[in-house]
Image (cartoon, rainbow, N blue to C red):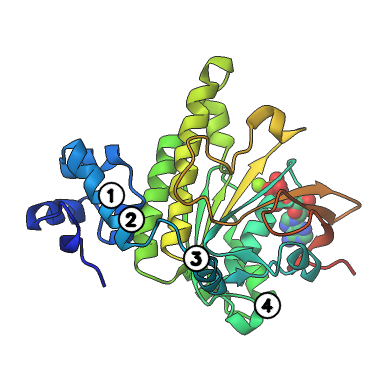
Amino acid sequence: MVELEDLDGVGPTTAEKLREAGYDSVESLAVATTGELMEAAELGMRVAVRVINSARDAAKMGYETATEVLERRKHIGRIRTGSASLDRIIGGGIETQALSEVFGEFGSGKSQLAHQLCVNAQLPPEEGGLGGKAIYIDTENTFRPERIEQMARAVGLEPGRVLDNIYVARACTTDHQVLLAGKAADLAKQGDVRLIVVDSLTSLFRTEFCGRGALAERQQRLARHLAELHKLAELHDLAVFVTNQVQARPDVFFGDPTRPVGGHVLGHSATARIYLRKSKANTRVANLVDHPGLPPESATFQIVEAGIRDPD
Ligand code: ADP
Ligand code: MG
């Protein structure tokens, strides 16, 4: 393994400062920005650039062959949703090393799906899970442990243990939300977190940055938040699942929230966008939108006491 001290421009003192600031691996430096490093480790700009470039070389973050990409993608894990037809259109479940977004109107089932994934992430792989823990960042106060208990029982897991394996935090402001994503990194470093939910990704950004004048800043801050979530997905091989409530056409209001404006070095992560619509009674229609490798198909599922399921 390459240590920080092996990098060009990093002596023992700098390595110490970097670790204190939370950069404890070559990978974490490879995805850092120059400004971040200058501030965190009191480096000059030239040194910061040298450190990042050297970390990118060491972490092989330049070009790689398609064979290497294929090899890495073989390790992608998937969390099943509870509905086989929904799983089919998204390629077998919500992927790790990627950020998936579900968008739709109020009541379309976004939070229900998020709850189900927190339970299913804990199932063993042969049952469609990843045997890991989940983190739930709740901005709308809609996380319900009682619902988790119901869903856990329905898949034969012990409800108390399932609740113990979900870290929940309520975010009240966008600053708080961003901070919680940072703290999620600390939890993820301990290893067994396989899913991070942000429900909702956008609601606080919408209320805090309203009006035309605030649009640019909102997009910028949201892009930074998303880039950080992408980093988490890549560095810790976990699935990031975000919800986004829309009234009518999301693109008109928002641009594409899963494509950060400034661009980021993690652009190769697969990104699924799922559009949910209410249908008759408890059924919902999901459409896969803009997937880099799958056709835009639709699936129907239902929300029942047991959770997300195929229609009868
Ligand atoms: P949103 O997209 O706004 O997050 P939700 O995920 O909260 O929407 O979905 C709400 C829907 O889920 C409601 O239509 C509600 O009837 C359904 N629902 C919630 N709990 C249950 C349950 N225990 N059994 C059946 N349906 C439920
Ligand atoms: Mg919701």
Relative horizontal placement of residue 62, taking residue 87 as reference (left or right): left
For the residue marked with disc 2, what is the amino acid? Answer: Arg
Residue 239 coordinates in the image, percent (x, y): 54, 61
Q: Nearer the viewer, residue 288 or 204?
A: 288
> SS class of the residue under badge 2?
helix
Location of residue 252 with respect to 289 vertically, above or below: above
Residue at the spot of label 2: 56
Q: Could you give the CA–CA distance between mark 2 and mark 4, rounded to whole angstroms? A: 42 Å
Quarter that holds the C terminus: bottom right
Number of residues whose C-alpha sits closer than 10 Å to that of mark 3, classed few (under 14), some (14–19) or many (20 or more): few
What residue is drawn where x is 33% and y is 42%? 33
Q: Nearer the viewer, residue 39 or 159?
A: 39
Residue at the spot of label 3: 65
For the residue marked with disc 3, what is the amino acid? Answer: Thr
- Name the mark on residue 52: 1
- Name the mark on residue 192: none
Q: Quadrant of residue 123?
A: bottom right
For the residue marked with disc 1, what is the amino acid? Answer: Ile
Residue at the spot of label 4: 155
Residue 165 coordinates in the image, percent (x, y): 48, 69
Location of residue 174 with respect to 237 vertically, above or below: above
Number of residues whose C-alpha sits closer than 10 Å to that of mark 4, classed few (under 14), some (14–19) or many (20 or more): some
Q: Are marks 1 and 2 in contact (CB under 8 Å)?
A: yes
